[in-house]
Each structure stands twice: as structure tokens, then as C-alpha cells.
Amino acid sequence: MDELEKYVEDKATQYIVVNLGIEHYGIDINYIDNIVRVPAIRRVPNVQSYFKGVINLRGEVIPVMSLRVKFDMPETEYTGNTRIIIVKVDPQAAIGIIVDEVEQVMDIYNSQIEKVTGEKKEESNGYITSVGKTDRGLVSILNLATVIGEKEQA
Amino acid sequence: MDVSQYLGIFLDEAREHIQVLSDQMMILEQEPENQDAINEIFRAAHSLKGMAGTMGYKRLQHLTHDMEDCFSDVRAGSMKVTSELMDILFQALDAIEGYVNNIQETTDEGEEENENIINEINRIRNAATGKEEAPAPEKAEAPAAGGASESKDTAAPSDKALYRSMKLDDSAKDVMKDASLTEKHVYGFTVYIEETCLLKAARAFLVIKALEDMGDIVATDPSTQDIEDEKFEFSFSLYTICDEEFDKAREAMLSVSEIADVVGEEFNETTISEIGAATEKKEEAEPEPAEVKEEPAAPEPKPETAPAVKKETAPAAKQAANTKPQAKKPVISKTIRVDIEKLDSLMNLVSELIIAKNTIVSAADSGDSSSQTLNEQVEYLESVTTNLHEAVMKVRMVPIESAVNKFPRMVRDLEKKLDKKMQLTITGEETELDRTVVDEIGDPLQHLIRNSADHGLEHPDERVASGKPETGTIFLNAFQDGNSVVIEVGDDGKGINVEAVRAKIVERGLASEDTAAQFTDKEVIDYLFDPGFSMAKTVTEISGRGVGLDVVKSNIESLGGDVSVKTKLGEGSTWIIRLPLTLAIIQALMVIIGDEKYAISLDSITTIENIPSSDVKLVQGKEVIQLRGTVIPIIRLSELLGFDHTEPSDDMIVVIAKKGDSLAGLVVDELIGQQEIVIKSLGKYINNDRIISGATILGDGEVALIIDANALI
């Protein structure tokens, strides 16, 4: 009985694990529309600093943001590994997130995930809901709604 | 009977009828003797009632029925059109609209009985006609008794009762005879459909369906197959074995819309055997049946003796049959209803096509210009896509009529509420705009009209004192002007008191007295569009809460338009709304600023000038230029868009942009040329300062941003 309950509860969710420097972040694969290399990014003046501009993705204009800037990390040059994750939290509005590197797709079980609480939560501005403990190390799971949604002045 | 499939048609038709009622009732109020208006009203009310009955909306049917009774009295001359009467009838119309709205949202008419309205209608009717209750049947009976001599029980007018001449085989007769001996009833009917009816078979089908709910159809003439195939004139006959009373059966048939009349009678065992005999006799005596068949085409000598029927409907239906051809003659255009989403996707495809075309154009430009045919084909492609775009755009265009036709009624109500005399004149309601714009423009216009009525127009005594006609005029003029549509809403009232507004600005602490004194009139008036700024001394039901003009402005700007106002103290004000014809694809001027490409909508550009840098003067710390006698402030876009200050070259390229009456010079670094561009949104996540209104994709796949010149001026 206990076995069964544990089995039922312990569902796995697939995450795309991306890297910023040495840190690993997980993005729920259900929100991901596409992963692309960095095309020409058109700057948009007078917007939030983390918005790097807009790109043309097969005829659609999509705003892209830098996760590094959003997380107050120093910016780096784009390399051959730099990718833009196109996510659609709201089906009508796609947005691109620039990350240093896409590492892998990973199943993370509920039992591996620990909620972030208290001080730690405030520190992360609510961007990180929980941390997954995997055999590859800790993966911070992004709360996409707050990462892309927050409207902060430029 | 399942009527849900007709719900859409019902709603559309009901709205049309309500609009007709509203329009004609307005006319009737002005001209109480106008017979055409009464007849129109009658026709609309009657159809509405019938439709409501068919769909099973009893409350709606009941209320419409009472309205119809009222108009019946008015038409018969036994009741005068009074303002009291019209007030209650308009209330009833609102209630009807309420039912229809409920039906649209929930497919149910709701629980509201509107008893007070019904009671009020009846009270006025009784008072006017001097009758205690239910006066209609008596009245209608009078001409019936005079018109024909046959007694009530047996009498269907013989020349209309075509069912009598139907040939029935013996087996059918036997079935009917058997049935007549039980508690069931046997009826013969001839159903007349209005001659203007376009879907005779469908209406006939509904009639038969209604009867089948109550019993069995024994025989029809022509056969059911022929009826379904519309192989009949405007009438058909049938025999039915029915569980219900005669009146109920007949009413069920009459409640199908576009049924002009139903005549019929009940048969018993003996009369059933006579059915065939009567026919033969008749055929021997005179060839009348043949003639009768054609008669519906000219139903003038229609005797008013339907046996034991709902009296009001018969004359009404006849009236409808007579007036309808006149009212309807120009309307038969070939139209289909198309889901707006399908049009949206068509529009998106056209957008894609234009982007693809732009790619080819730029490829052809950069390649060898020796290829003559390629260039020709590219030009051809360009003209085809432009035409295609225009055609698709036109499909989406509808007249603004649907947005403005509720206003006459509204002004009438305001007149009563505000105790002022006013009239509304509307011109250009046929002007066409994109469907989405028409859907959105109603509220802002309504607000401006209310504003004019409440704040603009003076009370009659005030008007007379200042030498104006007692009745104030509110006008709404719509017209196309180049690539945009202009809607002017205004009044001949007192106009905006600029000094009062200026005082209010100071009073509200929005600007110091000194600064306010330096504002131009226009700057002062612009404060009226600020959120929370209201000039009304007292808050009324109509306006004055300070919520309004700012909403008007933001609504209109969200449609890509702008609003301005012209006013003269004592003479009135005019609000001018300018809307783009299309929302998705525009002609734009491509420019280079810094090292980036930008697009500026061609609509807002008046001229492009080369100005020597030395011509730039400073006025109150702002850079201006003088152009043909006009002082124009200039805006250096490169600074605004976050570029470092560029070396001032000798000549500046200045794009002169216009918004309403104001001009501004936009300094750009380089011109590329004119291009058709597809507007793409930047999405909801990016906050920009509204200078950038969107983006577009150029032929080479590069993204260019669109500068909203309106936001700069």
C-alpha cells in the first residue's frame, strides 16, 4: 500500500536543464515551444534592461530577455553554445530567454524536489520555486510566470 | 421540437426587428399620424412575436404581444400616440432587448416577467380606449361581422378554404372518420405564406412540424415531398388529426414567422364524407379553384372571417403582406455570414504573402538588374498582393451604422432625463470601417454624445436668451479622409470655457498659476483627457464622475486613432476622432536612425524637408524650425532612441509629422523609401514608452521597429 502510494505520488516531470555559468536551472518542458541559436537581435530602445530586443522567428516578432541580466549576473559574450529558449506561458505571447547553454532533458521526480522557503525565497525574488536534487547536482526550477512576467522599469 | 439550430437566425432576426421597432417608434413619436411607421412597427412586432413563439420564449412572446395590441389600437385610431405611451413602449422595447440578450448569453430568456410594464401598457390602453379589459378581440370582431355573413362555426371563407377542394382517397377519409369519433379532432387547414418569404419550404416545414407535435398529418396538397421541394405557390392545404383545440393548433401555425394567414375548420363524421363531394360540385359549377390558386398574389379582397381565431393577428398579417414588398425592395443583396476568425486567418495569410513578396523584391533589387522579366514579374506580384490585401480588407469592412443606430433613441431618453430640447443628426452612417473598430467605437461615441447632451447643450430658456433656437443640435458626421476615417461628434451648445478649465487645473494643483497662465488653449483643453479630471459642478447620472474622456481617448488610441477637440465659447464644441482604415498593414516611410532601421506610418507624415542645421532656433529651451511661416518644434529621434549625440551635419533631414493640428519635425539620419509593412505587436512583456508601437519584418528578415509619431507630438 505504501509502495503504491509512493509510486502514484512520485510522478516525474520533464525539465530542460540549462546552464548560466556553473549554475543549473530547470524549465518545465511543457512551456517550451522551441530552442534556437541566437539570431540577429534587434534592440528596442527604452525598455527594461533585461530585454535584449526582438528577433524574427519564422515571421513572428518575439521579444527576448537575458536570464543573466534578470538574475543580476554579469553579461557574457554569446558563444556557439548560447541558446534562446522560446517559452509560451500564455499561448498568445511567446517570449525568448537567453541562456548560456542547454545541458539536457531530465526527469525529476517529485520526491527529489524540495520547495524553497523563507529567506531563500525572498533572495531569489520568487524566480525559483523549488530545487531538484539530482545525481548531476542541484537544479533550481524556474517559476516562469515571475521570471518573464514582472514589469520592472528600465 | 428542437429549435436550437435556428437560434442564430432567431437572434439575428430579432435584433433586426428590434432595431426597426426602435427606429420606427422614434419616427412615430415625431409624426404620430405616420401610417407607414405604424405599419412597419406592426410588421416587426408581429414577426418578433411569431419567432418568439416558435422558439418557445413565452415571456418575450407575451410582452411583444401586448406591444402589438397597443399599436393595433393606435392604428385603428382608438388610441392617440402620447409621450406617456411612447415612454412605456420604449421601456417595453428595452425589456424585449433584455430578453434577447439573455437568450444570446444563456439560450434562455430569463425569469423577468416585466409585469409592471405589461400592467402599465394595459392601464394606458384601457384608459385610452375606455374598455375594461381585453378590448382587442371585440374590436377586431366588428369588421369581421360586417365583412361576411357566414356563421362562426362552419365558416371559413369558401374561396380561401382550399382544403375543401382537396381530393382525399377513401382510406384517408376512413382514418379521419374513425378519429372524429374519438376524443381527437379532425381539422382541415389552408396555410398562406407571405409572398415575400424567401424560404417557403422551411416555413412550411415549421408549420407541419408544429402540427405534428400535436397530432398526425393525414394528407397534404401538394404532397409533402413537393412542399419540401418548394413546388407550391404561396399556400398549401392539409388535414390533420389533432389532440389540441382548434384555436391552439391554428395559433401554433400562425406563430411561425412569415405565415400570412391560416384558414381552417373542424370536421365531423358527416362533413368528412362531404369533402370530396364539395369539390366535385364546385368543379362542375365554376372553375374557381384554379383562379383561387393565384389569388394570394393579390390578396386585396380578403374577407376577414377566420373562424374563432386570434383576431389581432389576421389584420396584422394582412398588413404585413401588403407593406412588406415596399419596405424590402432594395435589400436583396447576395451576402453570406462569415466567422470573423476566418477573416482574421485570411488576413494573416495575406500578411505572410506580403512579407514573402518583400523578400523577393529585395532579392530582385540586389541581384543583377539585367533580368528584365524578373523585375516585371516582381512588379506584377507587388500589384497583385496589394490588390489582394485591399480586397481582404474590404471584406472586413462594415458600415458604422451598426455602432451609431442606437444613438437617436439614446438622445431621446437623454432629452427627457435632462429636461432639454435636443435633436441628433447623423450623416455618413454608411462609412465603412474594419469590423473590429466598429465593434469598439460605440462606447467612445456614446460617451461623447452624452457629454454633449449633458455639458454642451444649454437649457432651452438659456438658449433662447442667447439667441439660439430652443432645440439644441447634436451632430455625428462620419466620412473617409484619405487613408483614415473621421468621425466628428459635436453640438451647438455653450462650448468649453477654457478659462474655467484653466482655473480648475490650478485649483486641482495640476499646475501652478503661472504655468497654467502660459498654457495655450489647446494645452488647457488637453487636460480634459486626463484621468479623473471632471468639469461638471455636480455629478449627474449621465456624466461628471471624471471617468470618461480619458477612457474615450485610450479606447480610440488602442484602435490606432486619435481624438481632438475644437471649441468656441458660446458656439459649441466638436470632437474629432480619426481612425485608421486598417489595423494590420500600413504604408510606411523607412528611415535610418543611428545604425538602425525604423518605420514611420505614412499617414502621419505631411512632408520631408532638408533643413540647414543653422536654421534651428531655441524657443523656451526647445529646438524649433521655421517652415513656410510656421514654427515647428523638432525632435531629434537619435537622442530619444538612446543613441549618442551624432555630429551635426550641415543639412538635417526632417520628417514633418502631423497629429490633428499640431506639427512636429522628426530628425532622422537617412531615408530609405516607402514600403508596405505588416504590423507585429511587441508582445505584452516589454514595457516601452509608447514611442515604439510595434515591429515589422523586412524583406531580408531583419526586424524594424515602428515609430508612433502620434505619441511624440
Image: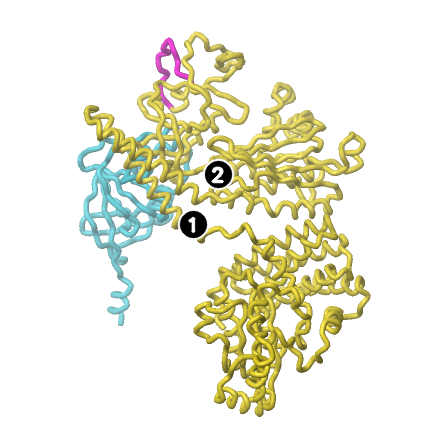
Q: Which chain is yellow?
A: B
Relative image position of residue A144 (x, y in whole percent): 34, 46
**Who is closer to the viewer here, B158 or B589?**
B158
Secondary structure category for the residue under label 2? loop
Q: Residue at x 35, y 48 (%)?
A: A89
Relative image position of residue A151 (x, y in whole percent): 41, 38
Q: Is residue A38 above or below residue B329?
A: above
Horizontal side of residue B24 vs B332, given as left or right: right
In the rendered image, the residue lying farthest to the top is B614
Residue matched to label 2: B559
Relative image position of residue B552 (x, y in whole percent): 56, 38
Query: Three-letter amino acid code at disc 2?
Result: Leu
Relative image position of residue B135 (x, y in whole percent): 76, 69
**Who is closer to the viewer here, B698 or A98?**
B698
Give yes or no for residue B567 being in the magenta stretch: no
Residue B116: in sight, yes or no?
no
Q: Estimate the spatial distance between the alpha carbons at disc 1 and disc 2, rounded to whole Å.
A: 17 Å
Q: Is residue B406 above or below residue B220?
A: above
Q: Are marks 1 and 2 on the same chain?
A: yes
Q: Which numbered marker is on residue B374?
A: none
Q: Which chain is cyan?
A: A
Q: Residue at x 67, y 79 (%)?
A: B155
Q: Is residue B649 above or below residue B314?
A: above
Residue matched to label 1: B340
Q: Is residue B256 above or below residue A106?
A: below
Secondary structure category for the residue under label 1? helix
Query: Three-letter amino acid code at disc 1?
Result: Ile
Magenta extent: B642-654
